[in-house]
Image (spheres, helix red, strand yellow):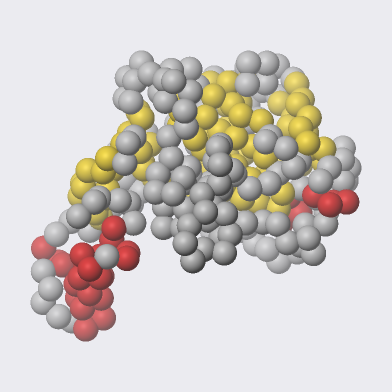
Amino acid sequence: MTPTHWLEFYTDYGVRLQKRFFGHFLKGEETGWNKQPRVQLRIRHPEEKFIERHEHEWPLARTQWTKFYLEAQQRALVREPAGTTARIDYEAMSEGLTFSMGPLREPMEITGPAAAKLFISSSTVDADLCLVPRVFAPDGSEVTFQGAQDPHTPISQGWLRASHRKLDDARSLPYRPFHAHDEVQPLTPGEPVELDIELWPTCIVVPPGYRVALTIRGNDYEYGGTPVVAPHVPYPLRGVGPFTHNEPRNRPADVFDGVNTLHFAENRRQIQ
């Protein structure tokens, strides 16, 4: 059986695992579930390598919550804020901006939830933010994985429409902003606003020599190269499977095809 991160969902092995879980919690059956640790992880490594590991809580109690700041001049991810004021414009429907760490000197495990804080403005009254944490090999190629819906899935993704930036403070956590979605707050063109964006929980061990990066764009992530055309799939696979954001009625060009601006100042921009 080829190990994948979605093995637990769609295979016979996965179905048996789910039946043990539901049998224990919903039917009161003796499935042995109460004799194993509460959390089971499949730790990802490049080249589709996965190692099973058991834990007792989620997020992991020994997590070292770490902030990284976006540095404008070098387009870098750094541990300390640069302390300078800057701004970068980008076309919303372009490839956006990518901020990267230098090559790692030792392995880095990224396991758990994450969030990003951005200060942005737009030339229009709204903006979509599509964030993509990424990993690159020493030769510059991107590390992706076979996902349930796409053969080239990045390590995580996050989305937020700027007009839905209002937080539910009672339910938000530092690593998981929770948005109320109970009112629309349009942008004033050119005026910066603060955005807290949830990133999907992820898990990967990044080897030495590899780089971790964050891409900020106004449209869906696309894996480089020729899109994959799969049998019986009515759309080309570009990196996000069927989960695209391209409905013209929801994303009219006069609003979402403008120019977005990232605003930088000390202690402002971070990914955690």
Looking at the picture, how far across and down is residue 46, in whole percent? 34, 34
Residue drawn at 11 percent across, 63 percent down = 35
269 relative to 203, above or below: above
Looking at the picture, how far across and down is residue 210, in whole percent? 40, 23
Q: The N terminus lies in which quarter of the figure?
A: bottom left
Number of callouts in the render? 0
Residue 162 visible here:
yes
Q: Nearer the viewer, residue 149 or 168?
A: 149
Residue drawn at 36 percent across, 43 percent down = 203
Looking at the picture, how far across and down is residue 72, in whole percent? 67, 21
Residue 166 visible here:
no
111 relative to 82, above or below: below
Q: Nearer the viewer, residue 192 or 172?
A: 192
Looking at the picture, how far across and down is residue 32, in whole percent? 11, 69
Q: Residue 170 vs residue 156: left or right?
A: right
- Determine which quarter of the picture holds residue 87: top right
82 relative to 96, above or below: above
Residue drawn at 64 percent across, 37 percent down = 216
Q: Residue 75 vs residue 34: left or right?
A: right
- Determine which quarter of the picture holds residue 179: bottom right
Q: Residue 95 vs residue 183: left or right?
A: left
242 relative to 51, above or below: below
Residue drawn at 36 percent across, 16 percent down = 105
- Determine which quarter of the picture holds residue 218: top right
